Image (tube, helix red, strand yellow):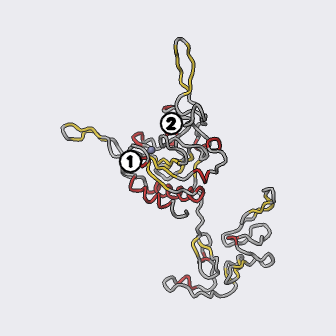
Amino acid sequence: MRQTLDAGGVPLDHISYDPWGAPQGSAIAPFGFTGELQDTASGSIHLRARWYTPGMGIFASRDSFKGFPEQPYTQHQYVYALSNPVLYTDPTGKYAQLEQKVQQPPIISRSEWGAMNPTQAMRPFCVAGACGFAPYGEGFYDPVTNPSGYACYTDLLPGRSLDDILDTIVIHHEGNDQTYNVREVQRKHMLGNGWTDIGYHYAIDPKGVIYEGRDIGVRGSHVEGQNTGKIGVLLLGDFQPGPEVSIGGIVIWRDTDDPRPTQQQVTMATALIRWLDVKYGIESVGAHRDYVATECPGDNAMPFIPSFNAAAQQNT
Ligand SMILES: [Zn+2]
């Protein structure tokens, strides 16, 4: 527990701890470090089998559990969380457990990468001598005139929460453009396709850097006609072999493609999926080609889809 609120949700007090659980410059709260009962007079933490003394980083009495023979360090009778409180906790006072908390991976926000704001794309026209600008492309949502437009879920599905609406993650690749650059993708979607914003909710570059795309509270534009409830994740790169040109059976030109998503891309995509699953309760992760006829996300990315899907099954 880090903060206490009054009945109106206004913060009353903020508490922080060092990794061992010693409060930093604030009074001891009865339930604080790792959510356990703490004696406000002595500062000792009650971990059921024993009392733990956070200032010293050790237990006040011997461990009733003798430890695992194959892991000698677990046989120490007084240490807390294998002396590694960043990775482990000890809720029973007997043995350490891996901290299960899933954290948000680092995400470069739209303002940090200099995203353009969503806008209604316009196209010049002249009909029978009358000239002007008309909206084209995606356009803003209107239940009558533009039901498939750029829509905040609060307008599209009023009264429903995001964790109720968002149930699927769809994986994409960039394809032949291979700019590896989220700005270029946004430019293409808005200025080329006439969309209101970048179509994907997240983009991940080959170094594993995650970029925020379209606001998560807005329906994406990445699975034609089936966008509602689907989070779009773009892996920057081209994972589809070819195309190629051959003369007389000899390949004379072949498009450059990426042999697979990089290790960093796969690692950070997995971290992103796990976090989105904890946040919204994701039911499945699929490839763009699972929903419509397309090469996306490319043959070389398809082998990773089952493990991405498995990452979304760990918490739900
Ligand atoms: Zn796609």
In the rendered image, the vertical position of residue 109 relative to residue 117, given as above or below: below
Query: In terms of sequence position, does the residue under pointer 2 or pointer 1 come before the other?
Result: 2
Taking the view exactly as shown, the residue that stands out farthest to the top is 129
Image position of 41 (left or right of 304): right
Q: Position of residue 162 (x, y in %)?
A: 62, 51
Disc 2 CB within 8 Å of nearest ligand 1 atom: no
Question: Mark 1: which secondary structure?
Answer: loop
- What amino acid is at disc 2? His
In the rendered image, the vertical position of residue 59 relative to residue 243, given as above or below: below
Along the line of sight, the residue nearer the viewer: 158 or 302 = 158
Classify 10 Å Cα crowding around label 1: few (below 14), some (14-19), many (20 and above). many
Q: Residue at x 64, y 51 (%)?
A: 161
Taking the view exactly as shown, the residue that stands out farthest to the left is 248
Along the line of sight, the residue nearer the viewer: 232 or 52 = 232
Which quadrant of the picture is home to ligand 1? top left
Q: Position of residue 128 (x, y in %)?
A: 52, 12
- Using the image, tell me which numbered label, if any, was put on residue 189: 2
Q: Quadrant of residue 111?
A: top right
Q: CA distance from mark 2 to mark 1?
A: 20 Å
- Using the image, tell me which numbered label, if any, was put on residue 15: none
Q: Position of residue 66 (x, y in %)?
A: 57, 88
Q: Position of residue 226 (x, y in %)?
A: 50, 44
Taking the view exactly as shown, the residue that stands out farthest to the front is 144
Q: Are marks 2 and 1 in contact (CB under 8 Å)?
A: no
Question: Mark 2: which secondary structure?
Answer: helix
In the rendered image, the vertical position of residue 243 relative to residue 309, given as above or below: above
Q: Where is mark 1, residue-wise?
A: 298
Classify 10 Å Cα crowding around label 2: few (below 14), some (14-19), many (20 and above). many
Quadrant of the snapshot with the N terminus: bottom right
- What amino acid is at disc 1? Gly
